[in-house]
Image (spheres, rainbow, N blue to C red):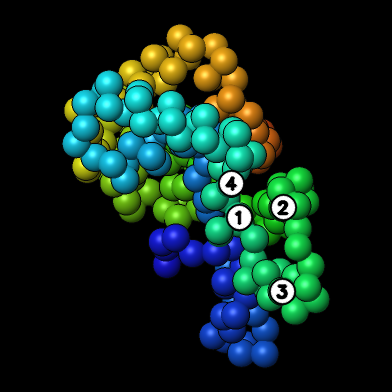
Amino acid sequence: FGGHLPLGCGDLLANPNQPEEKANVRYMTFVRDAVTKYLSGRMFVNKGHSKSWYIENLTKDINRDFERKEYHFRYENYLITPAQRESYRRNHITLSLEDKTELIIHNLIEYNVIIGVVERMSDSMELLKHYIDPINKMESLFVKYGMKDPVTGEIVRPREKNTSPVSTSAVLAEIKNDKKLYEKLVEIVKYEQRITDFAVGLHSRQYNMIEKMGAT
């Protein structure tokens, strides 16, 4: 099953063959460059505007968040487990962003999470296929969604739903022209970027592992 589900929710499932044991659940999550993720998210909830409108309003958002020290931190919504949340709530423990970052990194290792990376979609689809479809029944589906075709070597970019006429990359290029503004943006996403950097490292090791398995 899939969706925006928190890590650890499978801990509540029983093994259908041995109900006294937990189900054997493997988790996968996707990460993305934190700066791009911040901009894309803001643009997604404010569709249909011009590039100048996005630049103007994102500049306001970045300056406001920086002045208020409001760090963009959404990974906690699904990479901290329900059991952990309940434990901290029950014991009146409030974690800092630093603590949450370290906890999430720990969880990615502890739960052996399969990592997909938006900027490495072909490799991510290949990694996902390795676990879901090891006998190649659905290979064409993974190729459709961005995996390199093992026969032709081509990578098909899947059609994106809700495509905006203004790209995130175009907006980012404009923001980078304002060095101080860009530095503020990097600051307010720094905790998410730390998680992303660690997760990308895990992804690389996982992908290298299946490549070696395929070569043997």
Whole-percent x, y for residue 23 in the image: 60, 76
The residue at the point 53 percent across, 53 percent down is 28
The residue at the point 75 percent across, 70 percent down is 88
- Mark 1 highlights which residue? 76
> Which amino acid, mark 2?
Lys
Vertical relation: 83 (above or below) 160: below
Other residues around mark 2 within 10 Å, as few (<14) / some (14–19) / many (≥20): some
Q: Regarding mark 2 in the picture, which secondary structure is present there?
A: helix
- Mark 4 highlights which residue? 73
User: How far, Cα to Cα, is label 4 from label 3?
Assistant: 19 Å
- Mark 3 highlights which residue? 89
> Which amino acid, mark 3?
Arg
Can residue 134 be seen here?
yes
Q: Regarding mark 4 in the picture, which secondary structure is present there?
A: loop
Who is closer to the viewer here, 195 or 142? Answer: 195
> Which amino acid, mark 4?
Phe
Whole-percent x, y for residue 124 in the image: 47, 39
Whole-percent x, y for residue 1 in the image: 42, 67
User: How far, Cα to Cα, is label 1 from label 2?
Assistant: 7 Å
Who is closer to the viewer here, 151 or 97? Answer: 97
Other residues around mark 1 within 10 Å, as few (<14) / some (14–19) / many (≥20): some
- Mark 2 highlights which residue? 100
Q: Quadrant of residue 192?
A: top right
Q: Regarding mark 1 in the picture, which secondary structure is present there?
A: helix
> Which amino acid, mark 1?
Glu
